[in-house]
Image (cartoon, coloured by chain):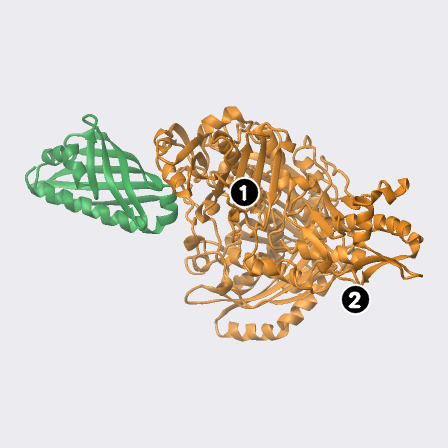
Chain colours: A green, B orange
Amino acid sequence: MAIKLGGEFEVKRSPEEVYDFLTDAHKFAPLLPDFRSISVTDGSHFTVQLNVGISYIKGTADVRMVLAESERPKRAQYQGQGSLPGGNLSILAGFDLAFVDGGTRVAWQGEAQVFGRLASSAGGLLEPLAKKNVQKLIDGLRAALAQAV
Amino acid sequence: MEVEKKNWVGRALPRKEENRLLRGRGKFTDDIKLREMLYLHFVRSPFAHARIASLDTSAAENLPGVICTLSGGELAPQTQPFIEIGPEPFAKIKDYPLAVGKVRYQGEPVAAVVGESPAIAEDGSELVRVEYEPLTVVVDAEEALEGKSLLHEEAGTNQVWRGVFEYGDVEKALREAAYEVRIDRLHFHRFSSTPLENNVIIAEWNSKDDRIYYSCNNSFPSFAIQFLAAHLRVPIDRIRVETFDIGGSFGIKITSYPQMAVCALASRKAGGRPIKWVETRSEHLTSSAHGNERTFRDTRVALDERGVITAITSRHIDDCGAYPRYEPLGCVIWSQVFPGVYRFRNARIDFMQAVTNKCPVGPNRGYSRMQHLWFLERVIDICAHQLGIAPEEMRLRNYIRPDEFPYTTPNGCVYDSGNYPAMLEVAKRRIGWEEWKEKQATARNQGRLMGIGIGTTLDSGTNNFGQSQIVNPGLPYSGNSQGANCKLDIYGEVVVAVGSCPQGQGHETTAAQVVADVLNIHPDMVTVRTGFDTERNVHTGFSGTYASQFAVSGLSAVHGAAQKLRAEMKRLGAFALQSHEDDLEFGVGAQGPEVRAKGSGKPISYWGLANLVNANSAALPPELYDVTLNCRYVWRAPFQVPDQQKKYGNLTLTYASQLHIAVVEVDRDTFLPHILDYVAVDDCGTVIHPPIVEGQVFGATAHGIGAVFLENCVYDAVGNMLTSTFSDYTPITAMNMPNIKYDHIETPSPHSYSGAKGMGEGGAAPVHTLSAALQDALFAQGVIIDDSFNNADRLYRALVKREIGQGKELVKVEKRR
C-alpha cells in the first residue's frame, strides 16, 4: 500500500540554513510525529524510535534512516526502513530547496509503503493518518525553521 | 418395536447429528484439552516477496513461558520438501511449511513459537526479529507468466503447468460459422470459504512409541498423511489422524498439512508434549487457502444461424498463488465439465497456470469447475444478447437433450443423466417467469435497471483420480475408492464406521438410512462412527470429505459393508435356526433387531448372533469360522485410466445439475444490486435425505451470492491482502440472503447403486445466475459483465465511470452469412 504526499512552503531562512537543519538528524528526527528516541550511527545514518498507535495496534516502530541524497543547499532525501507492530514500512522523504526573495521555498515529496498485517487490517486508516502526521511534520518543520536554526 | 417395512432412503428423518450439534454437545478439535499441552503461534511475513536476510529467535526463547521456537532454516534439514503433484520443471521447487530463504506471500509463516499459553506464544512471536530484503512483487498471473520476477528460482519459470485441450475440428467450425463472437477478456475473481471453525490442529510426536498423533479438522486426511509421511520421513503407519465434528470446510481445510507438519515438529522439539494451534480468522483469510482466480483470454465462439454454438477456443490462465500444493490438479479438474451442459463438440482450450505472490489456493466449493462453468455461462449469455436471442431460448437450443443421456462429452466424460429443459421449466414456473417479464418491461419503461438471469451448471462428483496423470503422467493415482466397516459388536449393536469426515453433510443420518434398509431395522438402531480415524482401518487413499461424492462413494461403501454383514448374519442365522438361508427374514422383534425363520417364526436376536462368534464360539462349526460379523468393504469406482496424450476419458462418475433463476435490480443512485426473486432447482438423482439436500442447496446458494456481491480477496500492488478481516471481506450472512425458492427433479444416476449423485458444491450456480441477471439488466447500457465479482463499486465504475465492462471494447461480433 503506497501513500504518496507532497507540497511546498516557504521559510525566511537561507537555503543553506534550511539544508543544514534538515540534514542534522538531531534536529530533524524529533520533528517526526510520535518521536521517542534517536540513535545516530554516522553523519548519514540514524535510527529513530516512534510511537505507533493505529486503532488497536499499538507499540513502537524502529525506523532505520539514511540520508540517501544530499546536495547542499539544493536537495536532501531520506530513505527509511522499519518494522512496527503488524508490519513493516519503507519511507522516502525528499526536500528540494530553492532561494526565493528573503528565504527558501521547500518543495517536499513523501512516499510511505506499508507492508503486512497493518496494511491488511488498517489499510483504510493509513492514508488519513499519514496525511495528518505529515502535516504535523511540515508544521513542525516550519515552526522550527522560523525559530533559531 | 414394530418397524414399518419401507425404504428409509428418501425419507425426511430427523438428522441423527442434530441432537448433539444443536445442543452444543458437538466435539470439535478445540474442545480437546490435553495434559501438558503447549500452544503454537506463527510468525508471518509482512512482505509478499522478500529474501530473509536474518532471523533471530533468541529474544523469544528468553521470554518466560516460551518452550521453543522453530524456523524454516532449522526445519529444512530435518525434513523433505513436500511432494509436488506437478511435473518438471515445477516439481523442482522446494516447498517447506516455514519459509526457507525467502517469503513468497504476505502471511507466509517464517517461524513458530511454542509457549505455555496461547498469549505467551503470541507475545514470543512478536520478539522474533526478521530482516527482509524486499523483492519485486507480482500479483497478476498474466504478468507472472512474463517471468520478470521469479517466485521459485529453481523452477526457472512462474508457469506451473500448461496443456492444450483440443477436440473436434475447431478451425472448420470457425470457417463455417454463421457468426463468430470474440470476447477479449473475462475474469473469475479470487474468493474463499469462511467456515465457522477455522483450522485447528493438535499434534503429539510421542517419544515413547515414536508415533505422531493428530487431532484436527483436516477434511482430506488420507491425502494429508501421504504428504506428511514423506515430508517428516516417517512410515505412514506411524501417523494417526483423528477428526471429530468439523464446523465447515468447503474444501479449504484439505490443505492444512503444512501447519500439521510444523505442529508435529514442534512437539518433537518440545519433548513430545502435545501442541495445539488454533488459527485466527485473519490467518485463515490471509494464509489458509483461497479459491482459484482465472482469466479467460481471446475467446472465439462459432455459432450457426440459430445461435447454436459449434466451437469455442480460448486461453485460460489460472492463478494458484505462491505454492501449487494441491495444484496443478485444478488444471485438469475443470475438464470434468468441459462442455458444461451444452452440446458443442469442437473446442480448444489452452490452459496454463502461474504462481503469484498471493496466498496459495486450495480446493474451494466448486473447485476448478465453477470457474469454467462461469466462463461457459458468460459465453452463452453474451452470445445470446449479442445475437438478440432470448437467453432462455439460447440455452434450450444448446442444451444436451434429455434423450442423449448417458452423454459422452468431447473429452470422454460420461454424463450419467439429466434433464436441463425440464429444470428450466420447473424454475420458470416457480419464479413466475411471465409475471417477472411483465414487471421487467414496466420497470425498464420507468428507467429502472432490472434483469432476469439463468444459470445452468453441473456438480460433478466422485473423481477419477486418473485425471491427475493428465497433468503428470508419473503420478501413481487413478480411480476412486472408499472404505466402510459394518459390524455387530459383541452385544449385537450395529456399528458402522466410514472413512469420511463430515462437516455438516449429515453422514451419520444417511449412512444409518442405508444400513437400516439393508437390515430392515430403524435407523436409530444403527450407530454410525463418523469422523476420520486411521486406527479404524476403514479408509483408503481417497478417504475424506470433498468433491461431492459421499452419496456415491461413501454410501456405496456403507451399502457394500452392510450387504456383507447381512450375508454373514444369514449364514449364522441358518445354522442357529436350523433353517435355509433363503427362508430367513430380517426385522425387529420384541427384543429388538432379529433374524427369523419365515415358516416357524423362530428368531435369533442380533446379540445371539454376535454371541456365537464372539463369546460362544465353541458351538460354531468349522465352516463358519470365517464369519466375523465385522465386515470391511472397499467400494471402487468403475473407472479407466484416461488417455494422457489425448486428454480423454471419463473423469467423474456422477453429474448433479443445478438451474437457478434470479431477478436483480441495480439501484440507479447507489448502484447496489438487489435480488428481487430467486429460485434454485436441483437434480442430484435419487434424493437420500430431502432436508439435507435442501440444506446443501441453500448453503451453496448463499456461498455463491456472497461471492458475487460481497466476498473478494483484494491485494494491492505490493501484495498486501486488503481483505483480511470480516470487516473488509464481508462474508454473506443471513441478513444478506434473499428468500430462496427451492425445487428439484430426480433423474436417477445409472452409475450409482441407489441412483443418487454426489452434490453439495452446487457448481457455483449463483455466480453464473447473478452475472446473467446483471448482464440482462445492463446490456442496454453497453455493459458486459466480464467479472464474477460485481459489488456496487464495480457497477458504478462500469455504468458511470465507464472504466470497466465496456461492451464495445470487450466483444466483437462478425456475421459471416
* Residue that appears at 27% across and 44% down: A52
Depth check, front residue: B573 or B30: B573
**Quarter-of-image position of residue B591:** bottom right
- Indicate which label's residue lies in the foreground, 2 or 1: 2
> Where, quadrant-wise, is the N terminus of chain A in this rendering?
top left
- Relative horizontal placement of residue B678, taking residue B446 as reference (left or right): right
* Horizontal and vertical percent position of residue B60: 36, 33
Classed neighbour count for the residue bearing mark 2: other residues with Cα under 10 Å, few (<14), some (14–19), many (≥20): few
Say yes or no: labels 2 and 1 on the same chain.
yes
The correct choice, above or below, for A137 with respect to B265 in the image is: below
Task: Check disc 2 and report the residue beneath it.
Answer: B2
> Where, quadrant-wise, is the C terminus of chain A in this rendering?
top left
Residue under mark 2: which chain is it in? Answer: B
Q: Is residue B190 visible?
A: no
Depth check, front residue: B567 or B800: B567
The correct choice, above or below, for B168 with respect to B26 in the image is: above
* Horizontal and vertical percent position of residue B138: 45, 38
* Residue that appears at 39% across and 35% down: B66
- Relative horizontal placement of residue B239, taking residue B571 as reference (left or right): left
The correct choice, above or below, for B159 with respect to B490 in the image is: above
Which amino acid, mark 2? Glu
User: SS for tag 2?
Assistant: loop
Q: Which mark is residue B110?
A: none
Task: Check disc 1 and report the residue beneath it.
Answer: B361
Q: Is residue B224 visible?
A: yes
- Relative horizontal placement of residue B652, taking residue B358 as reference (left or right): right
Disc 2 to disc 1, C-alpha distance:
52 Å
Which amino acid, mark 1? Val
